[in-house]
Amino acid sequence: MSAISRRIMGIALRLSLVVAVVAGAWSYYEMHQRYMAEVTKAIQMDLTLSCGKGFSEAELDATKNIYGLIDLRKVGCATERFLAKPEEISRAGALDGRAYAHIKYHHYVSQEGIAGAAIGGALLTVWLGLLVVFLRWLTLWVLGLGRPAA
């Protein structure tokens, strides 16, 4: 292996460490964002249901459809159609933790996923370094230049 090839692989190996850290951090960020979106959605649903608690039964009954579901948009609790059962409205408890207790952090953020992204990024970077070395060798061979002087 020539000095230039060794230098290229040295750069690729050092770069692979940087890529591994960036890929792992990005993977964690994406997983955490998915988790936070689910928690936010659950909290928003609970807040919307809790808003319905502030209305009398007569006001809520006026918004029932033929299936007995209450449209909370009609009483101003939602910006779009939001159908709920009366039991759901009575069970809602704003921000007491029950709304998102079923959403587990480890279902969204996993060490295996972060490690997989980091290892994959590092291996891809090393592979690309090997590809550059191979393409350099192939070009020199096709041109008939043989091995360049070190």
Image (cartoon, rainbow, N blue to C red):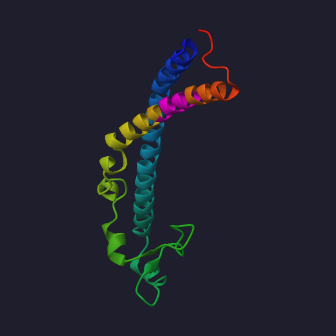
State left or right for residue 60 relative to residue 74.
left
Q: Is residue 125 magenta?
A: yes
- Would you say residue 148 is visible in this rendering? yes
What percent of the width, then of the height, locates residue 23?
Answer: 47, 35
Q: Which residue occupies the extreme right position in the image? A: 143
65 or 3: nearer the viewer: 3
Q: Quadrant of residue 74?
A: bottom right
- Would you say residue 25 is visible in this rendering? no
Q: Quadrant of the C terminus?
A: top right
Q: Who's the residue at 43% across and 39% down the image?
A: 117
What percent of the width, then of the height, locates residue 45?
Answer: 43, 63
Q: Where 65 falls versus 8 (above or below)?
A: below
Q: Which residue occupies the extreme bottom position in the image? A: 66
What percent of the width, then of the height, locates residue 56?
Answer: 41, 75
State left or right for residue 16 relative to residue 57.
right
Q: Which residue occupies the extreme top position in the image? A: 150
Q: Where 19 falls versus 149 (above or below)?
A: below
Q: Who's the residue at 43% across and 83% down the image?
A: 61
State left or right for residue 145 relative to residue 83.
right
- The count of marks equals 0
Q: Where 150 falls versus 71 (above or below)?
A: above
112 or 86: nearer the viewer: 112
Magenta region, main secondary structure? helix
Q: Which residue occupies the extreme front position in the image? A: 144
Q: Is residue 45 magenta?
A: no
Q: Which residues are magenta?
A: 124-132
88 or 122: nearer the viewer: 122
Q: Who's the residue at 67% across and 24% down the image?
A: 144
What percent of the width, then of the height, locates residue 81?
Answer: 53, 74
State left or right for residue 131 relative to residue 90.
right
